[in-house]
Structures are given as C-alpha cells and as structure tokens.
Image (cartoon, rainbow, N blue to C red):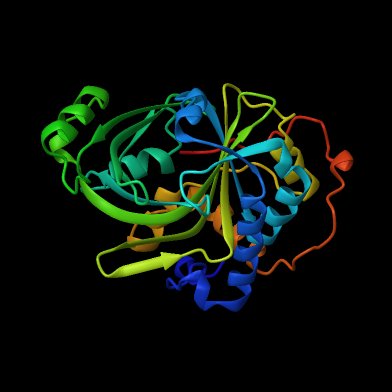
Amino acid sequence: MPPFSTLLTSYVHPSENAADALVRAEIGALIRALDAIDLTELDAYRLLDRTDTKFLLRDWQLVAILQAVGHRYRVLAATADRINRYRTLYFDTQDLGFYQQHHNDRQDRYKVRCREYVDSGLNFVEVKHKINRQRTIKERLQTATFYTRLTGEARDFVAAHVPMDVDQLEPTLLNEFSRITLVSKSRPERLTIDIDYRHEWGGRNGALPGFVIAEVKQPKFDLASDFVQGLRALGVRPGGFSKYCTAVVDLYPYVKYNRFKRRFLQLQRLRTQEPERGPLALESANNQPDSSQRGNQ
C-alpha cells in the first residue's frame, strides 16, 4: 500500500474546491429541509451508555441516503445552517499509551479530550471508556474554558474516571470538523455525521476532503435503523474508524499501525470510487446481521 501520508491531503477549505462545494451545498439543502430538534430535546437522546457503530463513506453517498430516509429523522438546529463546528484537543502519554491500547485491540481502553462546541462557545472535558467491542461509556464535565492542559477541575475530573496518574497526560493533537446530528423519529437512535475533517500538531496537518464519518449511537446495535438500511443499500458496511488513531498515524510517522492498514486501504478505494446517482433501492438491503467489526472510539 502507499505511504499513509499520501492517503490524506493538506487541509483545503471545502469552499476552495468546486466539487466539494457542490456536494456540500446539496447536503446543506437536504439538512435544512428536515424537521428540527433543539438542544433541550436532544438531551433525551444523549445515550451516554451505548453502542457506537461507525461508517466511512463519501459525501455523495450521504446525499443519496438523506434523499431516501432523511425525512425519518430530525436534525439538531443549534445554528442557522444546522451544521455545528467542533474543536477537540486529545491527551495521551508521552509514549502514546491510549493509542497503543487501541492499536493492540485492548477491550478496556480510554480516550481523554477537551472539546469546544465552536458555535455555542460551550466547552467540556470528556473521558470515553470502551469496555468491550460494542459498548462505550462517556463521562463529561462542562467547563468555563477550553483547557489546553489538564489542570484544576479538568485534571480532577479525569483523575476520577481514568485509573492512572493523569499528570502523565499531555496534549497530543488537535482536530476540527463540522457535525450534523440527527435523531430518529421512531426509535432510540442518534446519528452524528462528521464532514470537513482535519487535524494538526507540531507543524503537520492532514484532512479528509469529500469523506464522511458517520456514527450510529443506540442502546444496542439495531439493523432496522433507517440510516443503516440506506448505508447497506449502497454497500457501505460498519467498520471501526478512529479519528484519533488516524491522526496519530499521520502526525507521528514512527508509530506502528498494522491494525489500521485495512482501514487505510478502504480510504484509498473510496477516494477513487465514482459517484452513483439515482434513488436507493432500500428493499434490496440485506437483512442478515453483518459480522463486520463495530465502530471504534
């Protein structure tokens, strides 16, 4: 396979690429046509103890799915365009212990981050605890500031939820993306759809223009999800895709990444896949359970 660095590109804002801008406009129009949900209503769908199932797809595939099943969801309307910007700073040990846990497929593993909801100005320190292949518990504390070091209340919160000396944790990388949040009208299900993804640290940066990272959050994985059925009709199967691990491999070239090579090959295939147009044949989606790996943190 080619060097991983060739699978990502230097960051270019989507408005500077005509093809990306056109698809982004389609996504925006479809999202604005959906019924809305506000932040207060969204609290009922937080699902902090849940299964997360991730999917990697192209932006034109998202357009097809929204056209087919978007009306079965409500969209978070926290901003005028219903697309919310996130900025996240991850923390790890000097030897990237959290990354190594993930790479080595440790079932009991953690991620620590500080996240800013850019449009609302809200800040949180968060701990994600993966307790087995399918279940993730997220704890978070709202803070008055975006912490760039784990000090004060941020340090105390992490120390209460991660069984290690948290003074070993240091900032490792920063990522930014735009997120669409959908809530099912018929079942306990929340979707996060991330676009315009980029990361940076130490003078290096990378991006995934034209790609979408979708995550289906449910009490337990339910294949009957309308969004999942749309994905299956396009041949998109669940597969772990960690934004954090992808960024580490790109920004820290010396780390081992054998476990993620299959995902990077998937990136390469998707990048060359030609757009398909026309309505989805949802009835053709295979209703048998998929044995592929569920989503990773």
Identify which residue, 136 or 177, lies in the foreground.
Answer: 177
Horizontal and vertical percent position of residue 125: 27, 37
- Judge whether 257 appears above or below 167 on screen: below
Q: Position of residue 267 (x, y in %)?
A: 59, 60
Q: Percent x, y for residue 225?
A: 71, 32
x, y percent for residue 112 = 30, 38
Q: Write the residue at 76% across / 49% down.
A: 235
**Residue 164 at least partly seen:** yes
Residue 190 relative to residue 144: left or right: right
Question: Which quarter of the rendered picture does the C terminus lie within?
Answer: top left
Q: Is residue 280 left or right of residue 7?
A: right
Location of the N terminus (image quadrant): bottom right
Closest to the observer, 23 or 172: 23
Q: Nearer the viewer, residue 46 or 228?
A: 46
Q: Residue at 60% across / 78% down in the picture?
A: 18
- Considering only vertical position in the picture, is 289 above or below 57? above
Q: Residue furthest left?
A: 152
> Can the viewer see residue 253 in this picture?
no
- The residue sitting at 60% across, 22% down in the picture is 220
